[in-house]
Image: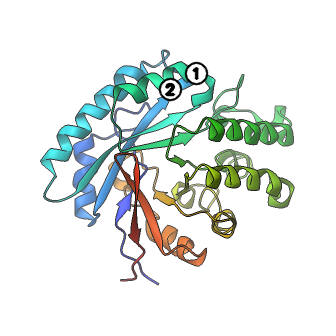
Amino acid sequence: MKYTIVADSHTHSCFSHDGTDSVLLLCSHAVEIGLYALTITDHFECNIVEERNYMQALNDSYNETKRTATTFEDKLRVFKGIELGQATQNLKAAESILSQCDFDFVLGSMHNIRGLQDFYLLDYDKLEIHDLLSTYFDELLELVAWGKFDSLSHLTYPLRYITGEHHTQVSYDLYKDRVDSVLKALIEQNKALELNTSGLRQAIGKTLPCPQVIKRFRELGGRYLTVGSDAHRHADIGSGLEAGYEIAQQAGFSHITIFINREPVLLPIQPK
């Protein structure tokens, strides 16, 4: 079935260290493909905030997004967001940037666990993967308990590299209880879960998290599901969203969620 794609809630501009294109170009492409809404969620990695001058970069992203939103106000709803990485590893930095900018949307992410680099930089031949993933889920629970975000991003992020690039299979059943604990904690705090479609264009070949986790979130009572391409260039804006909507609908969701002024807004999933 074909779906009308309406909103991309996870995108990166040149203000992210790994982004390439301007906010203007991202928005122009969003208009070209017929999106209703686009949220710019540039990186803010709390654990290395000074190393790459994230504070300045995020303020620049925020201000540029505000300006661009005015330019596109008759064509596209443009929202100010942030991907807040590793907030619990530097709460001072996390709370500082949140107090400085009135974001519409805050993604909570965990790209690395304490004492280690980003999962994409790790040498998995030298690590015990079970211990690594157990610690990751423990830190995710800590992040959810802190709770000053709107949606938990790419819950199975480590598998993008462990399974997708290192080709080590990980049994979902082995971690089901840990995943359930994270999902239940999100639901208790009335938070959203993100369906991240970036894996569909990467080696892992599936969304992050996979459809099974999305369905489980709904079974447990999850209400809010955000969907994002995790685009780092304009050509990937909207990528995989149609497949994401199908996964969401099959899991029992009739709507996706966007955030405006940190409040959830439900948009119906509509077949073309």
Q: Residues within 10 Å of mark 2 (few under 14, many from 20)?
A: many
**Residue 87 x, y percent position in the rendering:** 57, 30
**Figure disc tally:** 2
The answer to whether one can see residue 170 in this image is no
What residue lies at 35% left-to-right and 32% top-to-bottom? 15
Residue at the spot of label 2 = 94
Mark 2 to mark 1 CA distance (whole Å) = 6 Å
**Residue 30 x, y percent position in the rendering:** 28, 58
Residue at the outermost top position: 50
Query: Dot 1: what SS?
Result: loop
What residue lies at 72% left-to-right and 22% top-to-bottom? 115
Residue 40, compared with residue 214, is above or below; it is above
Q: Quadrant of the C terminus?
A: bottom left
Amino acid at the residue labelled 1: Asn
The answer to whether one can see residue 265 in this image is yes
What residue lies at 60% left-to-right and 62% top-to-bottom? 222
- Are circles 2 and 1 on residues that touch, CB within 8 Å? yes
Residue 7: which quarter of the image?
bottom left
Q: Residues within 10 Å of mark 1 (few under 14, many from 20)?
A: some
Amino acid at the residue labelled 2: Ala
Residue at the spot of label 1 = 90
Residue 206: which quarter of the image?
bottom right
